[in-house]
Amino acid sequence: MTVDAHHHVWDLSVRDQDWIPELSPLRRNFTLADLAPEAHAAGVDRTVLVQTITVPQETPEFLELAASHDLVAGVVGWTDLTRPDIADELARLRELPGGHCLKGIRHQVQGEPDPEWLLRPDVRRGLAAVADAGLVYDLLVLPHQLPACTKVAAALPQLAFVLDHLGKPPIASGALKPWAPDLQALAALPNTYAKLSGLVSEADPTAWTVDDLRPYAETALEAFGPDRLMFGSDWPVCTPVATYGEVLSATRELTGGLDAAERADVFHGTATRVYRL
């Protein structure tokens, strides 16, 4: 059993994905019909579908997809954390078709110019509502935003925070500091988790190797432990540099030193438990 705790889909005929550069190979449709055969060939039987863009229409669409496809066991959607009626909006989303599949909320914090956006009073109020709704919060941040993640996770111990892509470490440069100590500070809090996902996208796109990723994966394994780490493909964002199977194979190699129970945590136990799949 393998759970892919992080992937996306999009249909450019429904709406543009304005974060994708014009000439990128990602500028086409990627659907569950595209993903399913690759996931099944890799032995993945459940996934978590994660938001891609900050528009309110996307989350209900993803919930409907989850309700109609056995592959998708959970959705991490988007809603405006700062809206005054955030608690009511989360309740409304849970009542939509597929609403039982809503497991978490995410915002593109990496695009916020304020490195302490997560600490704003209106944002913290929204995060508290996410916790009250029994949902998880996914952190999409850059390395310089990790200290704010630690502060907000400490302030909201009732909320489970999941760090996407290990906070996008500077793998291409080979640098570990200040990313590593900042990651370790976040991991010191018991309500924090992280995804072994998106690493190939931070490496040299023309010549990455598993050894390039290893120091970052090992830092995360030591900091969080296997019972707070989960595998994510980051498909299709990974596809310009690696196939679905290559990402899974690399993650298996990076976790090759773990025992069977620890690998089970990384590849399905942690995600199943944290997202209540």
Image: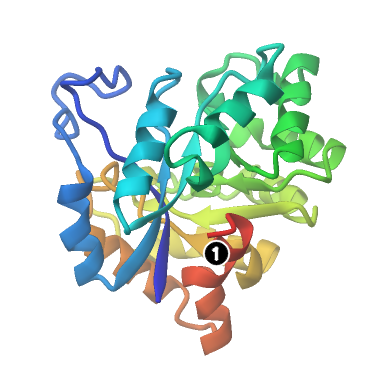
**Quarter where residue 157 is shown:** top right
Specify the farthest residue to the bottom: 260
Whether 11 is drawn above or below 187: the answer is above
Q: How many badges with numbers are in the image?
A: 1
The percent position of residue 271, horizontal first and vertical second, equals: 54, 61
Residue matched to label 1: 272
Q: Is residue 52 rendered to the left or right of residue 138?
A: left
For the question of whether residue 203 can be seen, the reply is no
Q: Is residue 134 rendered to the left or right of residue 13?
A: right
Look at label 1 and name its amino acid. Answer: Thr
The one of 232 and 73 positioned closer to us in this rendering: 73
**Badge 1: how crowded within 10 Å, few (<14), some, or many (20+)?**
many
Whether 42 is drawn above or below 171: the answer is below
Which residue is found at the position 59% from the left and 37% from the top?
A: 143
Whether 220 is drawn above or below 183: the answer is below
The one of 65 and 190 positioned closer to us in this rendering: 65
The percent position of residue 88, horizontal first and vertical second, equals: 67, 22
Which residue is found at the position 30% from the left and 48% from the top?
A: 68
